Amino acid sequence: MKKIYYLKTCNTCMRIIKELELPQDVVLQDIKTTPITVSQLEEMHKLSNSYEALFSKRAKLYKEMDLKNQTLTEADYKNYILEHYTFLSRPVLIYNAHIFIGNSKKIVAAAKAAIHE
């Protein structure tokens, strides 16, 4: 599978997509216009072994809902991600059974290396 989950309104996502120089066979999914399905999220979980790793603690809603002061389970993380797209740490690239989550320089470099090896 070759797919990237992103937000087209997110400048960071767009910069990373450009930087990665994605091959044409990579499917782009704007998670705002095409929400993540349960099976897509479960596929991400299979590769990452953690819903928490897929969860963005930077999301505005995370602060607004005061979630940092709650004890969240893996099921909670999964439900929040499915409930609202902003809870997915972005972008998420799945490339040849490898998953790259988020926008840190290290993750982006690793994704770029995997794509262009």
Image: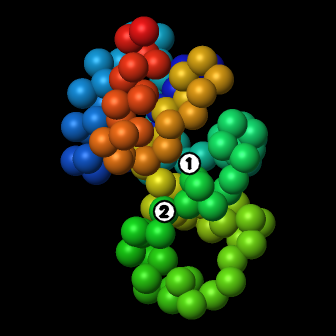
What residue sits right under mark 2 in the picture? 56
Q: Residues within 10 Å of mark 1 (few under 14, many from 20)?
A: some
Compared to 96, does 49 lie above or below?
below
Q: Residues within 10 Å of mark 2 (few under 14, many from 20)?
A: many
Decide: marks 1, 2 in contact (CB < 8 A)? Answer: no
Return the disc, 1 or 2, that comes first in the chain's sequence. 1
- Residue 35 vs residue 19: left or right? right
Secondary structure of the residue carrying numbered label 1: loop
- Residue 39 vs residue 56: left or right? right
Residue 70 lies, in percent from the top left, at 63, 87
All told, the count of numbered labels is: 2
Compared to 80, does 113 lie above or below?
above
Which residue is rendered at x = 43% and y = 16% of the image? Answer: 115
Could you say which disc has been placed on residue 12 in the image? none
The alpha-carbon separation of the residues under discs 1 and 2 comes to 16 Å
Query: What quarter of the picture does the N terminus occupy?
Result: top right
> Label 1 sits on what residue type?
Pro
> Label 2 sits on what residue type?
Ser
Could you say which disc has been placed on residue 35 in the image? 1
Residue 28 found in image quarter: top left
Query: What quarter of the picture does the C terminus occupy?
Result: top left
Residue 96 lies, in percent from the top left, at 60, 18
Which residue is rendered at x = 52% and y = 55% of the image? Answer: 88
Compared to 75, does 72 lie above or below?
below
In this rendering, does residue 1 appear at all?
A: yes
In this rendering, does residue 85 appear at all?
A: no
